[in-house]
Amino acid sequence: MLITILLILLILIMSFLLFARFRLTVNTEKGLYQADFGRWISVGMVRRKQNLCLRLRVLLVSFYLQPWKKVKKKITEAGQTSKKKRSRSVSIKRMVRLVKALHASLAIKRLRADIDTGDFPLNAQLIPLTYLINGGNRQLNINFEERNKLELIIQTRPATILWKYFTIHN
């Protein structure tokens, strides 16, 4: 009885992870850099006490992590730091297939960019290109006021990535 309840719970968790929405949000104007998985799990970068931290929120509980804080390495008896080497053999064909699947499964929900290159002639040359790219949920602006902003929201589901991975042929 306990095993069946655990199996059902495991299947429910796996199906949630497979079909939940994964959203990546970047907003330089508000300083928002965040990835959320459904509405239950999110990871974002925040500034806390003049340090850059990762805020991990699971359900309603928030954790703050500082992954780039320097950690002292253990020194072995010979006086050298211990290093473990990993060797993975991943074929180029498999990597290309994965990149194609990721590209095919990502949906850009919003792209707003305000760009200034600092070079007036180059800005003037880029303006016609922005008219070709703009439309729908994409809006690119070239300005001459030294203002650079980016607002980007990308959304996908892990099930979509898996589906595209197995259906894309090289």
Image (cartoon, grey):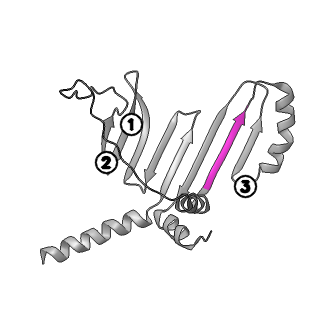
Left or right of residue 65, residue 170 in this image: right
Residue 110, percent from left and from top: 63, 50
What separation in Å lies between label 2 and label 3 (alpha carbons)?
A: 34 Å
Q: Is residue 149 magenta?
A: no
Amino acid type indicated by mark 1: Leu
- N-terminal of the pair, mark 2 or mark 3, is 2
| Residue depicted at 43% across the width and 33% down the height | 46
Furthest residue toward top: 50
Furthest residue toward front: 78
| Residue depicted at 69% across the width and 53% down the height | 137
Asked whether the residues under the numbered discs 3 and 1 touch, taking CB atoms below 8 Å apart as contact, a structural biologist would say no
Q: Reply above or below: 23 against 80.
A: below
Left or right of residue 124, residue 105 in this image: left
Residue at the spot of label 3: 136
Q: Reply above or below: 45 against 41.
A: above
Does the magenta stretch mainly form a helix, a strand or a loop?
Answer: strand
Assign a secondary structure to mark 2: loop
Q: What mark, if any, has residue 129 been given in the picture?
A: none
Residue at the spot of label 2: 60
Circle 1 crowding by C-alpha within 10 Å: few under 14, some 14–19, many from 20: many
Splitting the image into 4 quarters, where does residue 12 fall? bottom left
Assign a secondary structure to mark 1: strand
Residue at the spot of label 1: 54
Amino acid type indicated by mark 3: Gly
Asked whether the residues under the numbered discs 2 and 3 touch, taking CB atoms below 8 Å apart as contact, a structural biologist would say no
Residue 41, percent from left and from top: 37, 51
Amino acid type indicated by mark 2: Leu
Nearer to us in this view, 31 or 90: 90
Nearer to us in this view, 74 or 137: 74
